Amino acid sequence: MCGIVGYIGQKNAQEIIVGGLRKLEYRGYDSAGVAVLTENGLAHDKAKGRLAELEALLEVKPLEGTAGIGHTRWATHGKPSRENSHPHLDEKQKFAVVHNGIIENFLSIKEELIAKGYKFISETDTEVIAHLLADLYDGDLESTVRQAIKKMRGAYALGIMSEYEPDKLIAARLASPLIVGIGEGEAFIGSDIPAILEHTRDVYILNEGEMAVLTRNGIELSVAETGEKIERDIFHVEWDLVQAEKGGYDSFMLKEIYEQPQAIRDTMGSRIDVDTNKVVLPEIKMSAEELSQFNHIYIVACGTSMHAGLVGKEVIEKLVRVPVAVEVASEFRYRDPIFTDKTLVVVISQSGETADTLAALREAKKSGVKVLAITNVVGSSVAREADEVIYTWAGPEVAVASTKAYTCQVISLYLFALYFAQVKGTQSDAQIAEITTNLLELPGKVAEILENPEAIREFANTLTDVTSLFFIGRGLDFAVTLEGSLKLKEISYIHSEAYAAGELKHGTLALIEDNVPVICLATQPDIYEKTVSNIVEVIARGARTLGFAVAGDEELGKTVDSVIHIPQTLPFLSPVLSVIPLQLLAYYASAARGLDVDKPRNLAKSVTVE
Ligand code: HGA
């Protein structure tokens, strides 16, 4: 997620914090704020929009002090606004908190606090932390933070300060990155290295569930819940600023590929109730009756989002038995689609500003049809204009070629399909539980694939002189090959086509000749043998084949030239796994050709023109 900077020392905290936030601007954000301990106690200011808006306020009314915390927000819970931006403070303004991530159980904590009389002024999940600290405060900030952390579930990187203990900052993390910087008589908090690189290159990298107490005399690390002290080696940062912005990866795309386990976890987190194993979507405002009357769905999107929609179609049809048509937005908007009062339109857009998707949404709404949006950007045009929104909590995506947004869109479509199935009663509780249990295992399985990129890299290195290649698969595998092919085209400029394996012999097979690479997905058991027959057909024409099979499949390797296994899961969840090596393949093919992976020619991140 976005940016945290904290400082305690001898210098002007506001200047150091705002300077650090500026170094994090490249990640994208919608608002910013800072809190400083001044002579008159805890003071703060915040503003919607660019950092310059905050700076203009601070110029008029500077916050004088030598300890403070700051934040650039990229909204997940509540629209971008001054009220929702961080820091968040308790009612008496004694505690200030900045937070990256999502507090999954914030609603239940909020209800408890409201029952005790606490008043909330924002829509965020983060605000609960400030009130919780005020509620739990026992005269010792450190132990209070530990108690608060025990109550919170989800993902967080936190910067905390209190007027009661002015010579201290607290940093804590679970599943969101956080570092503390070591200085002479000063210490820093940063969500990313660039935030503090100007001031120090010596840092402690906090691990899961760890906490740091920063004073002007030093930094103490401990296990957040127990207080057990931790000894940690200092990490000396050798990176320059550009490398640091990419977290040490060669490109934003690779960084974002590797962020997928966390992004998927965040997107599912609070939406799967681990006690009941059911999906909860409190953001859906329409009633169960209203939702269950839909008997026809259009999924409308462009590019990668449309490919996510193709997976969604299979999943919704399988779980709910409601027909789904997937439409390219630029076509849909002009083609007079058939709407009835039982039609639901689902639009998908990473940025929420995709011009064709937005136009399609407006066409649907003009006809009185309900629209559900799946988007990554809170408060975007698509989110504002749709009747219902499910946010993908993928975090900001910088690389033009979308990766983590795609997997989170697919996850959101699974969640929607399951919720729809629950409402319509088309799946038993046991079936739903089996699926949600398997969904929760996906982040770990994605991480497993990412740990072993070597075989993919080797194959990608053989593609430097290739001018054309093919992807084949059936059913859900075909949907994934479309995305794999698009990714390869976008960033490696190699011509590629994804084909439904059974369609090949109706024309495209004529293009297969000696040494043409064909990437074959065979992860779907019900059509496995049919797919293998098609693979054999391309091999007979001289194709060089790379196969993808599910772990435990010892057969495919006997047919194809080389095989890569993905972990086992329910077959209809496999797209989230099988797409990962295809993203890596595109990345390594592009890198091997020496291309600019993050900024492919002719393309833009957010397509806001028709
Ligand atoms: N969930 C919090 C924090 C989001 C974030 O990480 N922003 O940078 C919110 O919506 O404010």
Image (cartoon, rainbow, N blue to C red):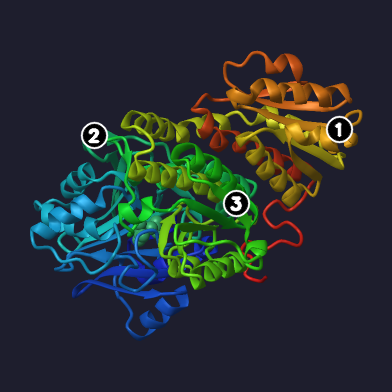
Residue 370 appears left or right of 111? right
Placement of 281 over or under 363, stated as above or below: above
Tell me the quarter of the picture where residue 154 sits.
Answer: top left
**x then y, percent, for residue 571:** 53, 28
Mark 1 Cα-neighbour bin, 10 Å: few <14, some 14–19, many ≥20? many
Question: Of discs 1 and 2, which sits in the foreground?
Answer: 1
Q: Residues within 10 Å of mark 2 (few under 14, many from 20)?
A: few
> Image check: 237 left or right of 111?
right
Residue nearest the viewer, comparing 433 with 324: 324
Considering depth in this image, is 463 or 391 the residue closer to the camera?
Answer: 391
The type of residue carrying mark 3 is: Val
Q: For marks 3 and 2, give the one nearer the viewer.
A: 3
Q: Residue furthest bottom?
A: 60
Label 3 – label 2 distance at C-alpha: 53 Å
Q: Is residue 375 visible?
A: no
Q: Classify residue 329 by image quadrant.
A: bottom right
Location of mark 2 (residue): 228
Q: Check disc 3: other Cα within 10 Å, few if <14, some if 14-19, many if 20+.
A: many
For disc 2, does the CB lie below 8 Å from ligand 1?
Answer: no
Let me know if residue 25 appears in the view: yes
On the image, numbered disc 3 is attached to which residue? 326
Q: Position of residue 152 (x, y in %)?
A: 24, 46
Where's the N terminus, which quadrant?
bottom left
Mark 1 element type = loop
Q: CA distance from mark 1 to mark 2?
A: 59 Å
Left or right, 323 with reference to 391: right
Q: Which mark is residue 516?
A: 1
Q: Residue at x 67, y 70 (%)?
A: 610
**Mark 1 touches mark 3? (CB < 8 Å):** no
Residue at position x 55%, y 54% in the image: 299
Residue 336 against residue 223 in the figure, above or below: below
State which tag comes first along the sequence, 1 or 3.
Answer: 3
